[in-house]
Amino acid sequence: MPRFSLKRAIALWLVLSVALVALLIRESPTLAYTPFASIEIQPSAGRPIHLPNRIFDCTQGAAQWQCSAALAEQPLDLTWSYSPAFPTELGDCGATYAGRTVSCREAGMDFVRGLQYRYALQGDLELGAAQLNGLRWHYWGINLLMSLRDLGLIGLGLGLSVAGGVLVALGAWRSPGRWAKGIASFACGMGMALLVANYFGRVLLETVHGVGISDDQWQWLTHGLAIAAGIGTWISTAALLYFPFGPVMRLIVSLLAGVSLFSLLAQSPGAYLLSFMGIPVGSGPFGSHLPIFLASGAAWLAAFWLYRKRPINTRRFLSFAGGVGVFAIGSLLALMGLLWLGYVD
């Protein structure tokens, strides 16, 4: 791939990623103040029409929720009663559109701000086919995202992460300079931070209570250790890439980098990627450990390349560590973002 084409591909990837993130944030169920997970129209013919939560203006009374929105220049009003003792348990849904009563039924549950119900408005709302299609196109964002469903959105996030990792790996191989070293060393730092945070995060709270440490203090201590370990690994890996080290220090830093890359690969949603590729994961004693085997072998090979520190080995390390870092960090951020924004549970 010519150099200018690679730069254009990276720019296109950045544009697509930013556009997707903006769309996910704009249509997010969790960022709107609503008592429900989602509202959809189920016409007598055709696919459901999903309505974004952001269009609803909701108010909470002493024992009733009221939400309203404008559809095709007509008011849609929804009401739910609830017991003050159990404010999250809504009663039956009441709905009117343009002053006419509409059937409103539960359509399942999603984990948005806790467990919340999805509701479906039954029928065409006395709208014509052209008006219904107009609503679907007007709210194309939420309808596109909902048509992908959980696995489709996860697959899209993984696909963009893989594409970003491949592009960065190719770029680092072509130009193993300052930016490639920065990405590779930062990836090692992130891997070590995740490893330390997850290891100390598994310590039973009863254990730390026994030595007089509160829950909040332990959380702060865990986060502090993780950040310190990550920064230390980041700096030491970058220093090894720029300056000559003795064999002992080179071995120590290379081992730390290998452990960090193993942590990134093992904790990334790579098993989902293997499943999408049709590789059996989780079936049988070998399949359940396949991601760990692959992550271990790849990480220690990268540590060997870093230790040898010949030009070709450094190029291999930068390409591998940069690509793995972008894929692993990107896929983790994608999965956490989808969870936080309420698209998957």
Image: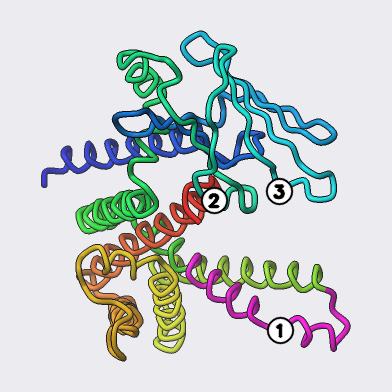
Q: Is mark 1 on a helix, strand or loop?
A: loop
Disc 1 versus disc 2: nearer the observer: 2
Q: What element carries label 2?
A: strand
Counting other residues with Cα less than 10 Å from the Cα at mark 3, is it few (<14), some (14-19), or many (20 or more)?
some
The residue at which mark 2 appears reads as 109
Quarter holding residue 99: top right
State how far apart marks 1 and 2 are (Cα).
32 Å
Nearer to the camera, 170 or 339: 339
Q: Which residue is drawn at 43% across and 70% down?
A: 264
Q: Which colour scheme is used?
A: rainbow
Disc 3 versus disc 1: nearer the observer: 3
**Residue 196 part of the magenta-drawn span:** yes
The amino acid beneath tag 1 is: Leu
What residue span does the magenta drawing correspond to? 189-214
Q: Where is residue 78 in the image (x, y as percent from the top left)?
A: 63, 27
The amino acid beneath tag 3 is: Glu
Q: Are marks 3 and 1 in contact (CB under 8 Å)?
A: no
Q: Is residue 287 above or below residue 195?
A: below
Q: In this view, does 206 lie above or below 324?
A: below
The residue at which mark 1 appears reads as 204
Q: Which of marks 3 and 1 is nearer the N terminus?
A: 3
Q: Where is residue 217 in the image (x, y as percent from the top left)?
A: 81, 70
Q: Which residue is drawn at 30% across and 60% down?
A: 323
State how far apart marks 2 and 3 are (Cα).
12 Å
Q: Is residue 303 above or below residue 127?
A: below
Please give the label number shown on residue 89. Answer: 3
